[in-house]
Image (tube, grey):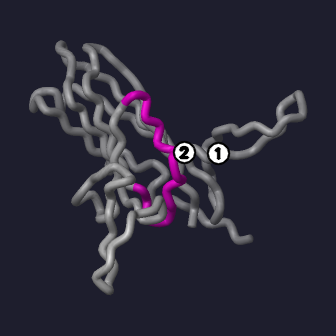
């Protein structure tokens, strides 16, 4: 199988979006994103476990894990913090892989123009019929964090598979 270099978005920090209900908090939330390849390894006990490694090249079927760390550097708690990650177009979201950690997670199937919970995200077919979106339809993931304490930190993450 030919190896494909996926330079396109393994490190897509410039495409992360954060917003907050309070305008001055926008500068105070620091985001750092990493992308790792998830690989199977055999541990010393002979069991298969998953490990994250720095990707050098990935091929169709490989899984990439995106982890976004957030840190509130403001002198006050930040409320209604929204972190939006696009899903690179050469990858497909792995169903139920977005870590919720008590947050609301919503998805978009139209390049981030509209977000909804999975059971409410509708696709309009060309013939006029509708259907629920599937993980393969998702283009963006959005986490809404009710409150991040002063100097508070956390992570959000998701997995995507190379097409």
**Distance between the Cα atoms at labels 2 and 1?**
7 Å
Q: Secondary structure at mark 2?
A: strand
Looking at the image, residue 159 lies above or below residue 2: above
User: Splitting the image into 4 quarters, where does residue 50 fall?
Assistant: top right
110 sits to left or right of 42: left
10 sits to left or right of 117: right
In the image, 152 versus 130, the foreground residue is 130
Q: Which residue is mark 2?
A: 65
Residue 43, how many percent across, how many down? 83, 32
Q: Which residue is mark 1?
A: 38
87 sits to left or right of 60: left
Residue under the image location 40 percent in, 50 percent down = 12
Query: On the rendered image, what quadrant is the N terminus found in?
Result: bottom right
Sequence-first tag of 2 and 1: 1
- Our reading of the magenta stretch's main secondary structure is loop
Task: Categorize mark 2 by other alpha carbons within 10 Å: few (<14), some (14-19), many (20+).
Answer: many
Q: Is label 2 in contact with label 1 (beta carbons under 8 Å)? A: yes
Q: Secondary structure at mark 1?
A: strand
Residue 63, how many percent across, how many down? 61, 52
Residue under the image location 49 percent in, 65 percent down = 90
Tag shown at residue 74: none
Q: Magenta stretch: give its range.
A: 87-102
Task: Categorize mark 1 by other alpha carbons within 10 Å: few (<14), some (14-19), many (20+).
Answer: many
Residue under the image location 35 percent in, 52 percent down = 107
Residue under the image location 52 percent in, 52 percent down = 95
In the image, 15 versus 79, the foreground residue is 79
Residue 162, how many percent across, how many down? 57, 61
User: Splitting the image into 4 quarters, where does residue 76 fall?
Assistant: top left
């Amino acid at each position: 199988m030919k190896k494909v270099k996926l330079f396109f978005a393994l490190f897509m920090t410039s495409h992360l979006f954060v917003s907050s209900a309070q305008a001055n908090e926008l500068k105070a939330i620091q985001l750092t994103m990493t992308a790792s390849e998830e690989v199977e390894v055999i541990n010393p006990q002979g069991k298969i476990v998953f490990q994250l490694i720095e990707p050098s090249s990935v091929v169709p079927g490989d899984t990439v894990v995106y982890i976004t760390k957030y840190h509130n550097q403001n002198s006050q708690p930040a409320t209604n913090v929204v972190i939006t990650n696009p899903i690179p177009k050469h990858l497909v979201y792995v169903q139920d892989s977005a870590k919720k950690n008590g947050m609301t997670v919503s998805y978009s199937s139209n390049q981030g123009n509209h977000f909804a919970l999975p059971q409410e995200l509708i696709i309009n077919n060309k013939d006029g019929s509708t259907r629920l979106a599937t993980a393969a339809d998702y283009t963006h993931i959005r986490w809404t964090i009710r409150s991040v304490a002063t100097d508070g930190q956390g992570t959000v993450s998701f997995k995507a598979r190379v097409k």
